[in-house]
Image: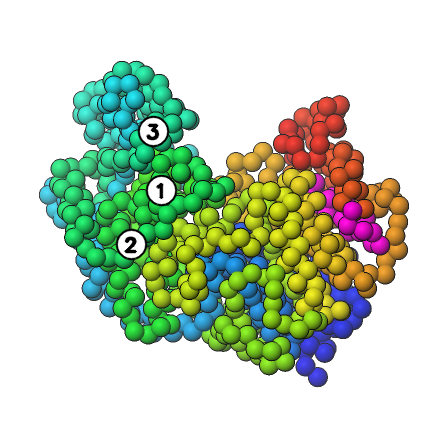
Amino acid sequence: MNDASKSGLHHDVRLIESEAFPLEFVCKLAEIESWRKEIYRPIYHIHKWWANRLGSVFRAILIGSVLPPDKNLSEEFYRKHDFLGITVLDPFMGSGTTVGEAHKLGFISLGRDINPVACESARVAFGPLHREALLQAFNRLSSSVGERIRLLYQSHDSKGNVCDVLYYFWVKTIECPNCSKQVDLFPNYVFARNAYPNRKPDVGVYCPNCHDIFSDSVTNHSVQCPNCRFSFNPHRGPASGATAVCGACNRTFLVAKTVKSTGQPPSHRMFAKLILDNSGRKVYLPITEEDEKNYRKCSRALKRSNLKLPSLKLEDGYNTRQVINYAYGSWRQFFNDRQLLALGLLQREITAIPDESVRSAMLRVFSGTLEFNNMFASYKGEGTGAIRHMFAHHILKPERMPIEGNVWGTAKSSGAFSTLFKSRLLRSIDYRSAPFEITVEKKGSRGRRSYGGSFPFSGQVELNWPHPSRLSSKRIYLSCGSSSKFDFPAGSIDLIVTDPPFFDNVHYSELADFFFAWQKNQPSPFNRDFSSTRNQEEVQDADSKKFRTKLLSVFSECHRILKDNGLFVFTYHHSRSEGWIALAEAVMGSGFAFINCHPVKSEMSVATPKSQAKEPIQIDTIFVCRKKAIDTRPKSDFSVALDRAIELSEMKATRLQNAGFSLSLNDRRVILLSQFLVEACPQRSIKELSDALSESISTLDSSALNLAVKINSGDMRIIGHPKEEGLQRTLFEKPVVTVRE
């Protein structure tokens, strides 16, 4: 008897459908993994993708979707399973978390995504990766094109010695619309600081008078340049928010409007560099005439070259509008001439590698290098990865003080090709051969690792899917295209596990075109028939009704190909009513019913968009669905469903709180809304549930504000709760309360 038949796949109720699902255990694993996702699940981080979900959460989902309720997930999680013959499909594959976790557990693993960048990244991550062959290819690249690129990033220190440049610092400049003088768009003159200023308060300061640089304390708001004795506030530059002030005529003007009127993106000016001297010490120095001359040589070399460079134009969209307003018209304009020369040379050398698997892997590292080596990257400072990549804010944000890194890199570089080859690709190869899981017991600040509970990755990827009867658990099946239509017969898939996109958040294709602008010049099975990654069938739209229609189309196809006893499980959270209503209508309209939900820790809580939110959502809901036709739960009054939802939400919130997880107001909203969909769903039409959700928002809002979660003997206190007006706010307005224990 194989593990599939022993597992309880055909039991009427599975562990994830019941309240026995140990959400506390899953949250503790997720909390540890979320801090170092690229360490604990490196295979999903070879290349950038958005909303990378946590591998430990999806492993728990998969095991819980097969085992009966009497099994102990905290024990089964570390056991080596072989769910032979059970098919798992992810119709929104992204970076491949579901696909990889299912493969490790012995499932037949299938993944599809509409975006060719995601598909190519997953193909490389799961395909053949031979460590020795890759190391040999890397060494050949290092001695050839790597040496040529390193020469582009050489300068001299203050004593005239040749040195490597780690980073060049640039500032955007535009012409004053009043007097035509160039205005540097410095938001402040502190260009370098440590990631831990309380411990290391020294900062690098640029003098706007003589252009020298010097060191001072981050706490000082009045400094004097030691070179020219000019006094100024280093924390206040000519650019502030949407405006800038011309130092020559004192005229204040709108930056974006001025830039757009020129029809060209802003110019850039180098003003500082960080070098490695002969002793290996990092030293900040001002830009010299030699540095400017070397850059001009790169510009001339670029013009003479016949390198394949990005030609893809920018298209208007939710995530591209901001840069289009800064007069950017193509993805090529995101790079300066030296970056284009270095990247073009590197791409040409890699595409000449004869071994397809080695070439594809190196091109993925190259593509990842693009994220850190462009004029939208910024400086995080010493004490951490120095380069803040261009997608730190999930948007295309024109950076007023961009940083240019050394494209090939040194031993002390950040975001360079050589460093990403080691930190991303080699680390993933090691994980593939010996995958491990995190335990809830920590070793210092790191999670402990448990080996032996998973199959190593086979390295076998199929792009042509056979009939379900001929699928093999030793292979991973990938496909690029819309998930609204599969060439599978009805009732052929056991489990569908996924993480669908949000309708109004990150528009993946608009951002992924940054990578595809280069990828389309490279050999890839997913490049054909694509001029851009944008697709009319992509389940992403700023209009909630269009989003619902697209999501409904995919969910309906999932319903068709799922077996009658199969589970449809996905993770979700949202901050707006439209997102929840669209989800409810898509699930019910496709023929599914909400069976249960579990709140679990979401992605890293210190991510930039979350750290800037007053009440960040740090909880994902795991929704468990079955086909509506076999849902035998009785219909209840909405008032009963609402009371039951509030009761169960408080119970689940209490469980999380007692496990050490603090919940924001928006977290409690997510828990309440999810539970309401589960309780109000049975034996109702789409319209009934949608109307009930809309009508219950104000009540759920009041419940979220008043949800007192008991912690041992003390209550969770809602600080600053506006007793009257707060209860009248709709559930999805920006909250004004903060929650503390």
Which mark identifies residue 170?
none
- The residue sitting at 73% across, 54% down in the picture is 589
Which amino acid is tagged 2? Leu
- The residue sitting at 59% across, 62% down in the picture is 483
Whether residue 672 is in magenta: the answer is: yes
Badge 3 or badge 2: first in the primary sequence: 3
Residue carrying label 1: 329
Q: What x and y, as percent, mark residue 172? A: 30, 33
Kindly tell me whether residue 652 is visible in this rendering.
yes
Q: Residues within 10 Å of mark 1 (few under 14, many from 20)?
A: some
Measured Cα–Cα span from mark 3 to mark 2: 27 Å
Kindly tell me whether residue 421 is visible in this rendering.
no
Which mark identifies residue 261?
3
Q: Nearer the viewer, residue 104 or 633?
A: 633
Q: Nearer the viewer, residue 229 or 735?
A: 735
Q: What x and y, as percent, mark residue 326? A: 37, 35
